[in-house]
């Protein structure tokens, strides 16, 4: 066996080893990204819950009435156009 | 360089490499055979960490899907006292960020010198958390935990109840449906590098969280708001000790509103006295007074003890029964049953009850299920008190006919009244409509009428509702509940209250009540309002303190539900229904 052949063989070994190390690194990096995404998922889940609560607060009937009163736009809170609707119903159905 | 020399060099080089590999292999075998257990333990401790994934407690929603109880994550601000060099300096730095005095923060840190975790402020909002994070102080941190939130504040608090620090339900629906609402926490393991950074998750130790199911109530937040607003205004106006109100659908038994005033904020339970947190609509039985009379009248008419035209002598407002004197608010002579109910004559009712006799009277009350729990889903319901017949005496006949010597919960009273409005068929009152799983699929549908059974003949119930109880509102004591667009039926009641510590009636202590329904013909809503201990110098009769509140509630809730009016400008109008 010549020195050149030995070197080529060692270089081949080294290449294979480097490839394995690189793949291992990539695998670890992907796993770390998955772990980070898990963390992000938990964060988003928590944020979603917070937003849901915030929306619920904004949808509270008393707050809607307060806003309607303070903005003075002349709008009627949802559900409170019922009297007019029922009158129309009466007009077409009274006998 | 000769070939031989080159070959020899190659052999030496490869032999060296082989020896190195053998050495490494030998070391590997040594590590595996001798050191593996110890090293594995050390590695696991260094590389692995396990964290809990909190399951979310289910939502509580109203009948229209509004979220009325939800869980969110909120952080606590904590300090590690072991890492603080200058407590006062840190307290001064932290003070404006958490909006607490520096002295108080310093005290909290010093109080736990040996601890690594001193909570400075619990459940802070996102802005405060951001301000604390900006400090980047090694001894200050944030730890998140689930917090139960009630976005509507005090509204519906008595029905919802609240949860404890551990997230378990302690009262109301939170307690009654705790096993459904409560989820199961998951956990996840993470493999970390030498710097404790997350490298990958440990698939073997991953247990996903199971979020809790949701509960949909029959309550409607808008009708609840209407009820609470009207009730609060009346309680404040007449300076009553407290008040309560229930709104119910007589055909389905669905409770649309249930309110007690003054209330409490379930977001901060400890800020209110325990007495305010009780759902008195189901826990506190009361003597119902004259609101009980329609029940007795139903029994008298059905049993044939009186007919609709018979006249009864009301003794011009004063009658002696043994040593006891019974009086009427408005003295009358001869009255038929309609007149007796319209003017709420105690004397007339005592005469009717005497015709029935105690056994028939007792049987009538039992038929309306008084003295038994209604079976509503909210925990803590009281059964009321109906004395056994053998404990009744001669005076009981008149007393019971006027709504005394019997204790009923407001819920029992409105349920009985709803049965009269529902052609004599009693339905079970309920506050829960549906149970959903965490994905929102229905797992149990409870949203249909659960019929308890007939409690009075349909023709008698219709007569009492459409003739007697309408007359109370049109011509009698319930005029305060009269509406422009709907014909209302109802009955007032004013009961004396006993001293808190002795079995005697307290002068000037009253409970004013009104139970009403609308619209006439096909009642969609029944409402009960009861005010306890109003200031008698202002008003105390049910007609003055409670009837207008019921009118206010029905007048707003019926249009909101899209119920067509059956009265226009004081004239009754006919409305074609689907069956016509």
Image: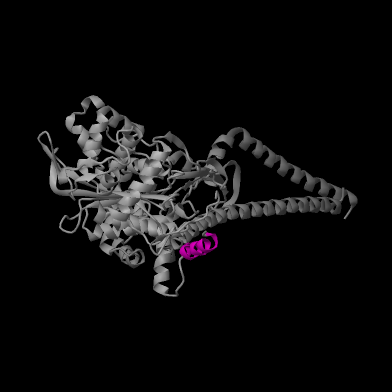
Which residue lies at the image location 78% right of the left edge and 53% below the top edge?
Answer: A15
Where residue B389 sits in the image (x, y, percent)?
Answer: 25, 26
Q: Quadrant of the N terminus of chain B?
A: bottom right
**Residue A86 vs residue B473: left or right?**
right
The residue range painted magenta reads A78-93
Of B161 and B227, the residue lying toward us = B227
Tell me: residue A24, above or below residue B299.
below
The colouring scheme, among rainbow, by chain, secondary structure or one colour, is: one colour
Tell me: residue A31, above or below residue B403.
below
Question: Image quadrant of residue B37?
Answer: top right
**Residue B396 vs residue B114: left or right?**
left
Of B568 and B164, the residue lying toward us = B568
Report if residue A89 lies within the magenta region: yes
Of A13 and B511, the residue lying toward us = B511
Where residue B185 sits in the image (x, y, percent)?
Answer: 50, 43
Residue B401, visible in the rendered structure: yes
Q: Residue furthest right?
A: B3
Secondary structure mostly seen in the magenta stretch: helix
Where residue A44 sits in the image (x, y, percent)?
Answer: 54, 57
Which residue lies at the image location 83% right of the left edge and 47% below the top edge?
Answer: B8
Please give the count of numbered marks on the rendered protein. 0
Where residue B26 sits in the image (x, y, percent)?
Answer: 67, 37
Q: Residue furthest top?
A: B390
Question: Image quadrant of residue B155?
Answer: bottom left
Residue B164, visible in the rendered structure: no
């Amino acid at each position: 066996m010549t020195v050149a052949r030995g070197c080529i063989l060692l270089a081949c070994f080294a290449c294979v080893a480097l490839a394995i190390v690189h793949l291992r690194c990539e695998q670890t990096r992907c796993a770390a990204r998955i772990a980070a995404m898990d963390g992000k998922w938990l964060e988003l889940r928590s944020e979603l819950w917070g937003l849901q609560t915030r929306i619920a607060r904004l949808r509270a009937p008393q707050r809607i009435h307060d806003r309607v009163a303070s903005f003075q736009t002349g709008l009627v809170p949802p559900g409170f156009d019922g009297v007019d609707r029922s009158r129309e119903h009466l007009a077409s159905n009274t006998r | 360089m000769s070939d031989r020399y080159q070959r020899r060099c190659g052999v030496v080089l490869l032999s060296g490499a082989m020896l190195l590999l053998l050495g490494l292999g030998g070391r590997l075998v040594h590590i595996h055979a001798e050191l593996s257990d110890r090293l594995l333990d050390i590695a696991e401790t260094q590389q692995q960490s396990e964290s809990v994934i909190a399951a979310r407690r289910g939502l509580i929603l109203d009948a229209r899907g509004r979220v009325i109880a939800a869980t969110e994550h909120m952080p606590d601000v904590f300090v590690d006292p072991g890492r603080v060099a200058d407590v006062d300096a840190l307290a001064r730095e932290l003070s404006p960020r958490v909006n607490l005095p520096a002295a108080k923060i310093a005290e909290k840190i010093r109080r736990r010198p040996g601890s690594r975790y001193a909570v400075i402020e619990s459940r802070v909002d996102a802005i405060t958390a951001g301000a604390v994070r900006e400090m980047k102080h090694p001894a200050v941190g944030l730890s998140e935990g689930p917090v139960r939130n009630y976005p509507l504040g005090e509204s519906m608090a008595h029905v919802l109840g609240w949860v404890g620090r551990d997230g378990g339900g302690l009262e109301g629906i939170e307690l009654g449906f705790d096993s459904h609402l409560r989820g199961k926490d998951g956990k996840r393991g993470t493999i970390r590098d030498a710097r404790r950074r997350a490298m990958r998750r440990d698939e073997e130790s991953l247990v996903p969280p199971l979020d809790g199911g949701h509960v949909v109530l029959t309550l409607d937040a808008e009708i609840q708001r209407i009820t609470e607003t009207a009730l609060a205004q009346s309680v404040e106006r007449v300076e009553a000790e407290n008040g309560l109100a229930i709104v119910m659908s007589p055909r389905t038994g669905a409770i649309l509103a249930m309110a007690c005033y003054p209330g409490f904020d379930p977001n901060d339970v400890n800020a209110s006295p325990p007495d305010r947190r009780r759902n008195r609509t189901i826990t506190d039985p009361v003597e119902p007074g004259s609101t009980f009379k329609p029940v007795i009248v139903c029994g008298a008419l059905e049993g044939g003890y009186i007919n609709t035209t018979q006249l009864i002598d009301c003794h011009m407002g004063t009658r002696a029964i043994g040593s006891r004197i019974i009086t009427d608010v408005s003295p009358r002579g001869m009255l038929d049953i309609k007149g007796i109910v319209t003017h709420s004559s105690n004397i007339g009712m005592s005469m009717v009850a005497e015709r029935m006799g105690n056994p028939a009277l007792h049987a009538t009350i039992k038929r309306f299920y008084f003295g038994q729990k209604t079976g509503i889903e909210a925990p803590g319901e009281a059964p009321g008190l109906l004395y056994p017949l053998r404990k009744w005496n001669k005076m009981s006949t008149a007393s019971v006919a006027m709504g005394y010597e019997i204790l009923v919960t407001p819920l029992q009273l409105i349920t009985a009244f709803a049965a009269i409005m529902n052609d004599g068929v009693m339905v079970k009152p309920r506050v829960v409509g549906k149970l959903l799983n965490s994905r929102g699929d229905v797992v149990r549908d409870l949203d249909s009428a659960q019929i308890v059974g007939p409690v009075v003949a349909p023709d008698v119930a219709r007569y009492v509702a459409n003739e007697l109880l309408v007359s109370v509102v049109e011509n009698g004591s319930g005029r305060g509940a009269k509406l422009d667009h709907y014909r209302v039926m109802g009955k007032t009641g004013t009961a004396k209250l006993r001293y808190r510590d002795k079995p005697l009636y307290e002068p000037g202590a009253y409970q004013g009540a009104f139970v009403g329904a609308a619209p006439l013909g096909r009642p969609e809503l029944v409402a009960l309002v009861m005010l306890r201990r109003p200031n008698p110098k202002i008003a105390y009769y049910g007609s003055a303190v409670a009837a207008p509140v019921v009118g206010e509630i029905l007048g707003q809730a019926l249009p909101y539900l899209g119920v067509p009016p059956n009265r226009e400008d004081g004239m009754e109008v006919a409305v074609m229904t689907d069956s016509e």
